[in-house]
Image (spheres, grey):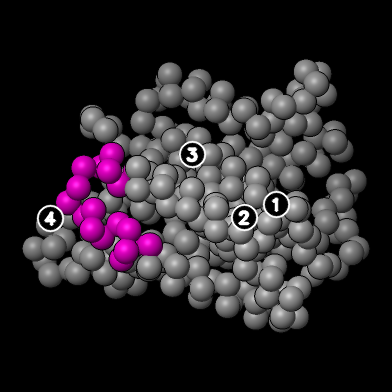
Amino acid sequence: MTFFMQMLVSGIVVGSIYALVALGFVLIYKASDALNLANGEFVLIGSYICLTLVTALKLPFLVALAVTLGVCGVLGLLVERVVLRPLLNAPTISVIMATIGLGNLLAGLVHMVWGHQTRVYPNLFPNTPVTFGEVLITPVYLWSFIIVMALLLAFTIFFKFSKMGVAMRAVADDLQAAASMGINVKRVFAITWAIACIVAAVGGVLLGNINGVNATMSVIGLTVLPVVILGGLDSIPGAIVGGFIIGILQSMAGGYIDPLVGGGLKEVFPFIIVILILMIKPYGLFGKGGMERV
């Protein structure tokens, strides 16, 4: 039972980070009907920037995190303005291909600047584990979970009550109607990409503190894809629920099944789950039905 609880806690923490990164994925899809396949590179860049600020410039972690979020917000705005805005009326497949090219470009930039070796954050959290019964939770896991839940709550309030949040929901629901009501659609798109880049960066910083930082971290972009498909590509609550489900199932598969098969199943298990779920609910758990050719 203790091992099960350890795997459950690990899955919940990692799943919460998946949910945060998936939030940005869903926002972009709702706004533009396009999949952002450069999401993993946003995660990677955010983690490397924060690590550099902490280790090379010796900034306090919270200051480095704030600067990282500002830089990544600007990066999101630049990506939308330079890469995506010229494709505003282009076919969806053109936008998807543009994000693939953008991902490759950003990955190459990361390799040139930071190289391929794994780097680790300095010890930013207390060393003493927190004990709940027989379950030990390391502070980095606990604080990562607290930070993610606080951000998810903040974004929920933002989307529900703020003027920009309402505008983003209106554009996601009906772009033409929103434009006819005087909403600046281009501005909404820009803010959407900035938020997507920021939440990806937070996810990267937290994962970097847990596992270290290297180029393979960008794989989270593929791992989050099953999350959003499971929850529903156009559903923000689905992204959150799907993140927790995938995180927990992936952790359980790594703890119980990997030792039986020699390892490797943990990475592909989310895709297996998604295939099974989509056979029953083709639009995900919370997605809206519809038909579209891409």
Where does residue 61 sit, x and y in percent of width and height? 71, 75
Label 3 with label 2: CB-CB less than 8 Å: no
* Residue found at x 69% / y 30%: 266
> Please, what is the three-letter code of the amino acid marked with disc 1?
His
Q: Is residue 145 magenta?
A: no
What's drawn in magenta, residue-wise? 79-96
Residue linked to disc 4:
176
* Residue found at x 40% / y 25%: 281
> Please, what is the three-letter code of the amino acid marked with disc 4?
Gln
Q: Nearer the viewer, mark 2 or mark 4?
A: 2
- Mark 2 or mark 4: whose residue is earlier in sequence: 2
Q: CA distance from mark 3 to mark 1?
A: 24 Å
Residue linked to disc 3:
225
Where does residue 129 sit, x and y in percent of width and height? 88, 58
Q: CA distance from mark 3 to mark 4?
A: 28 Å
Q: Residue furthest left?
A: 180
* Residue found at x 36% / y 53%: 28
Q: Is residue 156 left or right of residue 168?
A: right
The relative height of residue 232 versus residue 269 in the rendered view (above or below) is: below
- Mark 3 or mark 2: whose residue is earlier in sequence: 2
Residue linked to disc 2:
111
Residue 52 location, quadrant: bottom right
Q: Secondary structure at mark 4?
A: helix
Q: CA distance from mark 1 to mark 2?
A: 6 Å
